[in-house]
Structure formats: C-alpha cells, structure tokens
Image (cartoon, rainbow, N blue to C red):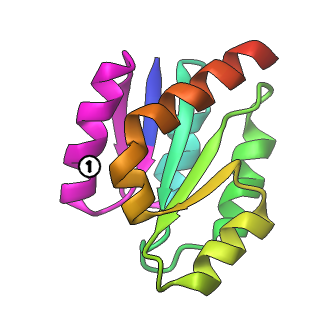
C-alpha cells in the first residue's frame, strides 16, 4: 500500500515516512501535481497528502484530476500553515477529505493516516 506525498519539503517528507511506516505504507514522493496524479492512478495508492505550500499549486484542479483518474475514491489530505487561511479554505472547497494545519498534522499524523485508511477500507 502506498501514500502519495505531494511536497517539496524534506522535513515534512521525513516525518511522513515515519508515520507511513507505522501504518504499513510506502511513501511515493511527487514534486509536482502531474507526478502526484500519475502516482495516484496506481491501485496500490491508498492516500494522497498535499502540502498546500507547494508553489503554483491549484488544489481544485489537482483534486478534480485525482477524482477523475481513479475508479476507487482516494482520500486526500491537505495541510498548510495555520496562517494560510485562504489556502486551507480553498482545499476544503475543492473537496479534500481532510484539511489540517501543519501543527495538527505533526501532532496527529499517524492517527490521521490510520483513521482515513480504515474509513477508505470500509467504503471499498
């Protein structure tokens, strides 16, 4: 099972790796949205984590493409600094399954992943 991480932040990637391992996930890193969409088409992909600080990111377009390219729903988590209220709101409006601040993600990453994986498994 795979977690797709759309981010250029190496510190975030390191923390995600640890939490992903605890949930038996392999992390696939994507540096731009097109790479993330391709990675999400893999049937082994179980979760997409999007760093809203990614330069030039159009979260609405990304969500639209991911939803279009997959038959099974893939949970999408977006995270960003609490001071980027507009970006967090855009992610919510775009249809991300969960939108959290970086602080919230850092504190609860493992449980967030676990909850979304369980919920997604029940939907299958």
Q: Residue at x 37, y 63 (%)?
A: 103
Q: Is 36 covered by the magenta stretch? A: no
Give the x, y percent position of residue 53.
Answer: 42, 74
35 sits to left or right of 91: left
Q: Residue at x 45, y 25 (%)?
A: 2
Packing grade of label 1 (10 A; few <14, some 14-19, many >=20) is some
Location of the C terminus (image quadrant): top right
Is residue 37 shown above or below 78? above
Q: Residue at x 30, y 63 (%)?
A: 8
Question: Which corner quadrant of the image does residue 123 belong to?
Answer: top right
- Nearest the viewer among 43 and 99 is 99
- Nearest the viewer among 9 and 84 is 84
Q: Residue at x 54, y 60 (%)?
A: 100
Q: Is residue 30 visible?
A: no
Question: Which corner quadrant of the image does residue 92 belong to?
Answer: bottom right
Is residue 39 shown above or below 8? above
Give the x, y percent position of residue 26.
Answer: 34, 24
Please state the extent of the stretch shown in magenta in the rendering. Answer: 5-32
Provide the residue designation for mark 1: 13
Q: Is 9 covered by the magenta stretch? A: yes
- Nearest the viewer among 31 and 98 is 98
Q: Is residue 69 visible?
A: yes
Give the x, y percent position of residue 20.
Answer: 34, 29
Give SS at disc 1.
helix
């Amino acid at each position: 099972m795979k977690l797709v991480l759309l981010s250029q932040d190496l510190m975030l990637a390191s923390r995600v790796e640890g939490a992903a391992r605890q949930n038996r996930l392999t992390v696939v890193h994507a540096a731009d949205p097109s790479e993330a969409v391709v990675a999400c088409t893999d049937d082994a992909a179980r979760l997409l984590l999007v760093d809203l600080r990614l330069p030039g990111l159009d979260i609405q377009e990304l969500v639209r493409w991911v939803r279009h390219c997959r038959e099974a729903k893939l949970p999408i988590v977006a995270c960003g600094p609490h001071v980027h209220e507009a970006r967090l709101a855009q992610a919510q409006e775009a249809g991300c399954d969960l939108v959290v601040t970086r602080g919230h993600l850092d504190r609860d990453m493992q449980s967030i992943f676990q909850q979304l994986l369980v919920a997604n498994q029940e939907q299958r």
